[in-house]
Image: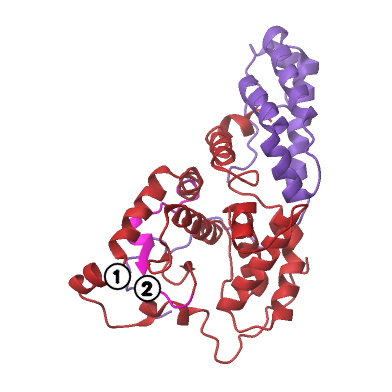
Chain colours: A red, B purple
Amino acid sequence: MDRSEPPPEVAEGEDFGYRLFPERHSEAKRSFLTTSLFTFNHKCQVMLRIALDTNPYAQLLLDAMKQSGCTVYKDRHFACEDCDGCVSGGFDSATSQIVLCQNNIHQQSHMNRVVTHELIHAFDHCRAHVDWFKNVKHLACSEIRAANLSGDCSLVNEITRFKFGLKQHHQTCVRDRAIRSILAVRKVSKETAEKAVDEVFDSCFNDHEPFGRVPHSKSDAKYAYRDFQNRNRYYANL
Amino acid sequence: MSSMVLGSGSCATVSASSMADGGAWRPPRTCEDYWSEWKHCKGIRNFFHNYYTYGEVPSCEQWKIDYSNCRKWEKSKSPDAKESLCKSERARILEKQKYDPVWKLRKTPPRDWYLPLGQDKSK
């Protein structure tokens, strides 16, 4: 990894993906009545609360972030908003907020996955100097980790997308989803996105923090959470 | 994440003194954890997940060896069992550190993590 290489210049007209989250840059705020009656805001808030309280992936990430000095507060660090397109969520490093697309998340299992995915970005932001805006390799690394560790690329999810494969298909999915995510939020060519993902893939696909393994199920996530809670004993006796 | 802090009961403690210090060292995981990891590794779900992720059959033998060394330590405080366990766990950690990190780790969390919203909208 050549760290002396200067980060690429920011493209002209780059909006860093903010066009997908119109409420982020809109000064006009909707009234409470409008929000209550005409959006899925309340449903989003309820599903978010359930995810944070019961999902083992989210619970491990919340604990890990607290341990790293970034305690997550639901009201400060999460926002349910209407988004453009098919996007499900995003992490806004400028405001340290996870945005959940209330108009695109309608099932608890989907909410669990999106919360996990975005918490992984938040965790990376908390523990490392991630240059989200100017270094495509950093963005690629976090997207690889989020696709790898959140359950985005489970066999069931891939089949529902009509993507079929078995042997090592998880890695193909992670690579493709990372490239798609980069292209959605950065004005770069497909070749640039692919090159960035390929260059950091080995390092980032094998970085399983804070899980210590690729959690393929809630059962895996519970094992990972157990290991996390026992880490003091683990490292003290090595 | 935690750094590797060598406590008073670390693997680096010389065998003779580890017997003398009244057994401050204990296996990095409980023996039940080694057993459950072995059972989990051997299961059909893990077989499938490993093939789907890495394209190969999982290797579970080391968990079984670690479990039996853990029990051996519990029973007789065997220095060989301790050394085998330490070697095995260190190998697991080294396996995870095979690749150079892409980014530099922070020493302190981001300064604006707790800032009230609206104060950093100028970014």
Image x and y of residue A204, in percent = 69, 58
- In the image, residue B49 above or below residue A43: above
Quarter of the image where one finds residue B115: bottom left
Residue closest to the far left? A33
Same chain shared by disc 1 and disc 2 = yes
Image x and y of residue A38, in percent = 26, 72
Q: What is the crowding at mark 2: few (fewer than 14 residues within 10 Å), some, or many (at least 20)?
A: many
- The alpha-carbon separation of the residues under discs 1 and 2 comes to 8 Å
Please identify, in this view, whether the residue under mark 1 or under mark 2 is nearer the observer. 1
The chain carrying label 1 is A
Residue occupying the point 75% across, 76% down:
A5
Quadrant of the snapshot with the C terminus of chain B: bottom left
Residue closest to the far top? B76
Could you tell which of marks 1 and 2 lies nearer the N-terminus?
1
Q: What is the crowding at mark 1: few (fewer than 14 residues within 10 Å), some, or many (at least 20)?
A: some
Foreground residue among B9 and A21: A21
Image x and y of residue A30, in percent = 24, 77
> Which element is circle 2 on?
loop
The amino acid sitting under disc 1 is: Thr
Quarter of the image where one finds residue B34: top right
The amino acid sitting under disc 2 is: Asp
Is residue B10 toward the left or the right of residue B110 in the image?
Answer: right
Tag of residue A82: 2
Residue A74 painted magenta: yes
Tag of residue A39: 1
Residue occupying the point 64% across, 64% down:
A162
In the rendered structure, are the residues bearing label 1 and label 2 in contact, judged by CB atoms less than 8 Å apart? yes
The chain carrying label 2 is A
> Which element is circle 1 on?
loop
Q: Which residues are magenta?
A: A66-85
Is residue B43 toward the left or the right of residue A13 in the image?
Answer: right
